[in-house]
Image (cartoon, helix red, strand yellow):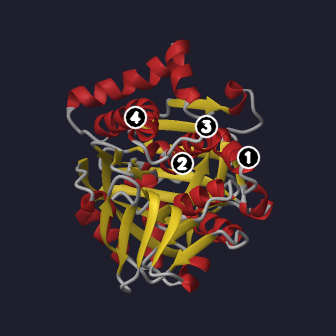
Amino acid sequence: MKKNKIFDVIIIGAGPIGTTFACSLAKNKLDIAIIDKLSEKKIKNPNVDGREIALTHQSVKILKDLDLWKCISNKSISLIKEARVLDGDSSYFLNFKHNEIEKDNLGYLIPNHIIKKKIYNELTKFPNIKLFSKSECLSIEPNTNYSTITLSNGKKIKSSLVVAADSRFSKMRKKMGISAFIHDFNKNMIVCRMKHEKLHKNIAYEFFRYDQTQASLPYIKNQSGIVTTASKNFALELMAMNKKQFNKKMQISFNNFFGKMKLSGKRYSYPMITTYAKKFISNRFALIGDAAVGMHPVTAHGFNLGLKSLEILSNQIKYSIKNKIDFGSPNILKTYQKELHRLAAPLYLTTNGIVGLYTSNVLPAKITRQFFLRFVNTVRPVKQTFINMLK
């Protein structure tokens, strides 16, 4: 390879958003480079990370349009038929049913590592995508026509556009001088898979307790993805418990809702931090996925919003190619930024607001929480707004 190889697009990050974005561009005969610090072996066979991804119908359509949905086996997919939200010890719940969106289910549940693995496998079929594994971007120098990236192995590569998909803690975002709104909830999220005695009936649950939040995502063979959000100290206690203690604690936390519960596999802990970049673009540079907006998992929209961000940018690039416009030009990138901000800002603010309300223990908040559930459940236009987020 030439020292200063020129690509059409360089993508930083070989996670599922970065690789999906690469696949979306490869069919347009663009030369794509992907840079990731992990080895190709680890990218190809990602570790289980405990996270279950809930995909909306719109996200599945994006993957189908890219011919990527077919690579995920039906054996790995569970359907979400209904979602219920409960507050405190009340038995009243806010309910979302699949017939409200005129579909046979609300969405699809797939383990994160399977999505990573399958999409990367599809990516390897494109000869015009080059992976730079075990590599990091040391510097980026944009100019009028290209951006030049210096890699940790000493190589330099150029492209018309650099796109960062390197997590909510994006190093590339910082290198480009883009700051972000950061909300640290001072809590940790513990995720794991558990088997349980009672059937979940393909219903997802969100239990807003006063000291922690419990969520269950219905998976195959009478298993659920369990998400516990708690203070950092309590999260450490949960992680330190032996399996027997943890099983009992989860069973009690769910008020024996699922009967006996048994841990299947490991527990994983993640800090509860949301991010929103103050801008999504710079000179021949754009942010997608969590690098642009890192959502709270309570509404399960992180990956869905990431897919939408790459679709918007991909469409702008395709439009540019069709009309013989430089897709790294300011006007094209500004259009991308405007469209993503219009979509992401209300979702991000609403989600953070809900989390703030439902994790507060003060009396006014507790009263408001109960009222809010009933208000959304009974006022059709308000509920429709939330239903639209599930489509």
Image point (68%, 58%), residue name: 29
Q: Residue 341 appears at what percent x and percent y?
A: 40, 34
Compute the Cα span from label 4 to label 3.
24 Å
Q: Which residue is mark 2?
A: 310
Precedes in sequence: disc 2 or disc 1: 1
Compute the Cα span from label 1 to label 3.
22 Å
Precedes in sequence: disc 3 or disc 2: 2
Precedes in sequence: disc 2 or disc 4: 2
Q: Residue 187 appears at what percent x and percent y?
A: 28, 56
| Marks 3 and 2 close (CB-CB < 8 Å) | no
Inspect this view and state whether residue 14 appears.
no
Label 3 sits on a secondary structure element that is: loop
Residue 87 is drawn in which quadrant? top left
> Please, what is the three-letter code of the amino acid marked with disc 2?
Leu
Q: Residue 124 appears at what percent x and percent y?
A: 68, 73
Rendered-image quadrant of the N terminus:
bottom right
> Please, what is the three-letter code of the amino acid marked with disc 3?
Asn
Compute the Cα span from label 2 to label 1.
13 Å
Label 4 sits on a secondary structure element that is: helix
Precedes in sequence: disc 4 or disc 1: 1
Precedes in sequence: disc 1 or disc 3: 1
Q: Residue 149 appears at what percent x and percent y?
A: 37, 70
> Please, what is the three-letter code of the amino acid marked with disc 1?
Asp
Rendered-image quadrant of the C terminus:
top right
> Please, what is the three-letter code of the amino acid marked with disc 4?
His
Q: Which residue is mark 4?
A: 341
Q: Which residue is mark 3?
A: 323
Q: Residue 65 got which mark?
A: 1
Compute the Cα span from label 3 to label 2.
20 Å
Left or right, 146 with reference to 313: left
| Marks 1 and 3 close (CB-CB < 8 Å) | no
